[in-house]
Image (tube, rainbow, N blue to C red):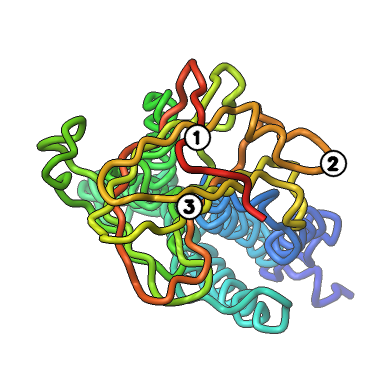
């Protein structure tokens, strides 16, 4: 007697050995999403991990499609396989985002969920566009429809991943600006700036600042709060071929004020004594400061600052009694160090 499973119309049972690779692949991608962290707080790494949701869930969708095909016994992806894979991967995406609220330092993010969906839809759309059999029902228009879907998916991926080109441009402009290591008026500088209890704006140089006459400078307003200032993250890291850090400050104030320059390298610890800290007295009018790099290198008490791996520098005020503003020009590396006008080591 013929068993029911042996009837000609019965679907073959799933081959668990064929199910394992796509299932384990999806699990590996989910674990990577849950456990992986950028190796640092660098602008490039942050952007890469943010946009990484797109290809990650695109690959998850392809693995899900394979899983669906094995479960349904399909030899080639059918329209229903693609639909099931789309729905399943979308649910997986939403679930992984929701579960992040239970992870320390993570939270559910609508933007990340949208990036996940872009990857899922785009990757599955490319698979569908490359399967002529799926478009036969449209007759002569099927080929045109498939090409339009393919073009739309590729365009969507290109636009979604375009910020990576922006990252490359910002880093290239940072390198091209040398020996200038910071210019707050330039667009390439913006991703590398972090304001703390301060305000920054571009404006024309004040009258009397001859070197910057007719050019834009930055006006930095220090608010009435502890440690207001601006952090330059990821300046060009190798300062070893120069001898001094030079910058100009214009003050329209009637009284002198103090500024502090802090410089860190990539090996820094949180201790105050493990970095360079220099205080500067800013007088009314133009102030031209030049800090020898030997002085910066000798800033840490127990070692030398690594001038080949500078990670950030900060310009800040200690605790101003009231808000005040200063005008800043570019920060540039120079070949010859000069004495620091009106500056001494910070406590």
Q: Position of residue 225 (x, y in %)?
A: 47, 76
Q: Quadrant of residue 56?
A: bottom right
Q: Position of residue 213 (x, y in %)?
A: 13, 35
User: How many residues crowd mark 3 within 10 Å: few (<14), some (14–19), many (20+)?
Assistant: some
Mark 1, mark 3: which one is toward the viewer? 1
Residue on which the image places disc 2: 302
Which residue corresponds to the image point at 42% horizontal and 36% vertical from the top-left? 289
Which residue corresponds to the image point at 17% horizontal and 44% vertical from the top-left? 205
CA separation in Å, label 1 and label 3: 16 Å
Label 1 sits on a secondary structure element that is loop
Q: Position of residue 259 (x, y in %)?
A: 47, 54
Which residue corresponds to the image point at 63% horizontal and 62% vertical from the top-left? 64
Mark 1, mark 2: which one is toward the viewer? 1
Name the N-terminal-most of marks 3 and 2: 2
Residue on which the image places disc 3: 315
Nearest the eye: 69 or 149: 149
Residues marked 3 and 2 touching at CB (< 8 Å) = no
**Left or right position of 20 against 223:** right
Name the N-terminal-most of marks 1 and 3: 3
Quadrant placement of the C terminus: bottom right
User: How many residues crowd mark 1 within 10 Å: few (<14), some (14–19), many (20+)?
Assistant: some
Name the N-terminal-most of marks 1 and 2: 2
Is residue 80 something one can see in this rendering? Answer: no
Is residue 319 something one can see in this rendering? Answer: yes
User: How many residues crowd mark 2 within 10 Å: few (<14), some (14–19), many (20+)?
Assistant: few
CA separation in Å, label 3 and label 2: 23 Å
Nearest the eye: 336 or 127: 336
Residue 340: mark in rendering: 1
Q: Position of residue 215 (x, y in %)?
A: 15, 37
């Amino acid at each position: 007697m013929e068993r029911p499973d042996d009837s000609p119309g019965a679907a073959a049972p799933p081959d668990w050995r064929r199910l394992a690779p796509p299932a384990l692949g999806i699990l590996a991608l989910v674990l990577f999403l849950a456990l992986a962290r950028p190796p640092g707080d660098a602008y490039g790494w942050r952007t890469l991990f943010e946009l990484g949701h797109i290809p990650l869930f695109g690959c998850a969708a392809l693995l899900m499609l394979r899983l669906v095909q094995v479960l349904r016994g399909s030899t080639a992806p059918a329209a229903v396989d693609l639909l099931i894979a789309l729905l399943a991967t979308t649910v997986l995406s939403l679930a992984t985002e929701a579960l992040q609220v239970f992870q320390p330092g993570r939270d559910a993010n609508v933007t990340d969920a949208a990036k996940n969906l872009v990857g899922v839809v785009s990757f599955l759309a490319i698979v569908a566009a490359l399967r002529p059999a799926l478009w036969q029902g449209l007759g002569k228009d099927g080929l045109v429809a498939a090409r339009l879907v393919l073009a739309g998916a590729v365009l969507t991926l290109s636009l979604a991943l375009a910020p990576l080109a922006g990252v490359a441009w910002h880093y290239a402009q940072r390198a091209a600006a040398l020996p200038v290591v910071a210019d707050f008026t330039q667009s390439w500088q913006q991703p590398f700036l972090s304001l703390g209890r301060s305000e920054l704006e571009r404006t024309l140089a004040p009258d009397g600042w001859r070197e910057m006459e007719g050019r834009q400078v930055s006006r930095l307003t220090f608010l009435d709060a502890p440690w207001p200032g601006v952090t330059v993250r990821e300046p060009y890291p190798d300062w070893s071929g120069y001898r001094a850090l030079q910058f100009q400050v214009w003050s329209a104030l009637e009284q002198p004020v103090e500024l502090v320059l802090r410089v860190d390298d990539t090996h820094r610890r949180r201790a105050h004594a493990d970095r360079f800290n220099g205080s500067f007295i800013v007088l009314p009018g133009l102030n031209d400061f030049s800090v020898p790099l030997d002085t910066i290198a000798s800033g840490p008490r127990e070692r030398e600052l690594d001038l080949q791996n500078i990670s950030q520098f900060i310009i800040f005020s200690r605790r101003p009694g009231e808000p005040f503003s200063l005008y800043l020009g570019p920060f540039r590396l120079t070949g010859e160090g000069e004495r620091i006008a009106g500056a001494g080591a910070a406590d």
